[in-house]
Image (cartoon, rainbow, N blue to C red):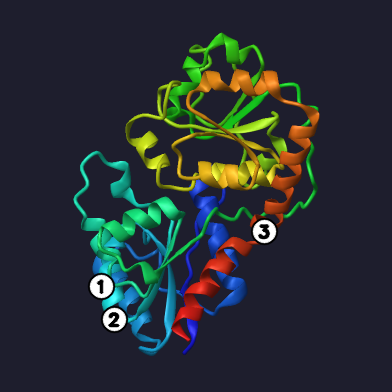
Amino acid sequence: MSVFYYSETYSKGKNAGNKARNDVEVILSRNYPKLTPYDVKLNNRIVRTLKVLRTTFSVSKEDIIIVQYPLPRGLNWLAEVLTKIRNIVFVIHDLYELRMSNFSGVEIRKLRKAYGIISHNEKMTKFLIKNGINKEKIVNLQIFDYLIDNKTLYDHSNDKDMICFAGNLAKSGFIYNISEKITNIGVNVYGINYDELKNAKLHYKGSFDSEVVYKKIKGKFGLIWDGDNTESCTGNFGKYMMYNNPHKISMYIAACMPIVIWSDAALADFVLENNIGYVINKIDDIFEIYENLTDDKYRIMSNNVKKIREDIINGRMLEKALSLIIKKSN
């Protein structure tokens, strides 16, 4: 039995999704030989499909192929087909149906016959099991890796502002509704699609490439929140946080920054168990953290962040999860 992976290439830039997939590509390339089933130059859907199938059939039935899920645009319908002809291990980036208000189960059916699945966390895994996927096939990633070239340690204890928030600001309407109580202790905002007219008390610091943003951000804590509401993470994006691993938490950790996260988010347990930050029910709860924060508390959390950082900046989270999947086959 041999293990291969489907190679894919996405452009670098300010898209965190591309950063996540590119990092998985690098980690897989260190450990396994690659297959090249995807050709962005092919415009014909039939020809693209045939190339994927031909590449898949090029390995033996006993071999394992690691595939990033979802597949590239226009090819995701093939996921279920691949699981029927070879041993496919899916590394999940997104489950689109979890973002939707009406769950149909179509996407889950694509994964049911997979040889193995790297799920984000225990909450996502429970959802997969509840919808008919064998728990023996699933391993939790825990948190995404975030590969960086510069291993410099950063100290945010002397940062003037309390909060850092980085992301696509078009889908983060809550930032414009943050109360003056919180903006008065400092909120630094980074990302694309910022509307400077909506809240003059925020400190907008610009937008940076996903490969360098971790070196640019400032603030004592990185905020994990989504949606339009400051009282709770609501809507489809808020619901999704109950299952997924936001890539920005890995970016904050790469920046050596402790975390403030919504209490119902899937990764809230990870933050508490590793003592790398605080969980909150609403944004205004940050003020209580601010009032009670001591140098000792912050130093302990920062040191814990740095321990986890060693794993994520070196790609060890995915390597550990894949080794568990592959061991099950031996």
Q: Nearer the viewer, residue 300 or 210?
A: 300
The image quarter in which residue 231 lies: top left
| SS type, badge 3 | helix
The crowding category of the residue bearing disc 3, from other C-alpha atoms within 10 Å (few below 14, some 14 to 19, many at least 20), is: some
**Which residue was labeled with disc 3?**
311
Q: Are marks 1 and 2 in contact (CB under 8 Å)?
A: yes
* Residue at horizontal 67 percent and vertical 58 percent from the top: 311
Q: In the image, what residue type sits under mark 1?
A: Val
Q: Is residue 238 above or below residue 250?
A: above
Which label number is shown at residue 81? Answer: 1
| SS type, badge 1 | helix
The crowding category of the residue bearing disc 2, from other C-alpha atoms within 10 Å (few below 14, some 14 to 19, many at least 20), is: some
The image quarter in which residue 227 lies: top left
Where residue 36 appears, as percent x and y from the top left, is: 45, 74
Q: In the image, what residue type sits under mark 2?
A: Ile
Which label number is shown at residue 12? Answer: none
Q: Is residue 136 above or below residue 262?
A: below
Observer able to see residue 15? no
Q: Is residue 238 above or below residue 48?
A: above
Which label number is shown at residue 85? Answer: 2
Q: Are marks 3 and 1 in contact (CB under 8 Å)?
A: no
The image quarter in which residue 77 lies: bottom left
* Residue at horizontal 76 percent and vertical 26 percent from the top: 294
* Residue at horizontal 48 percent and vertical 23 percent from the top: 282
Where residue 173 appears, as percent x and y from the top left, is: 43, 23
Q: Earlier in the sequence, mark 3 or mark 2?
A: 2
Q: Are marks 3 and 2 in contact (CB under 8 Å)?
A: no
Q: Earlier in the sequence, mark 3 or mark 1?
A: 1
Q: In the image, what residue type sits under mark 3?
A: Asp
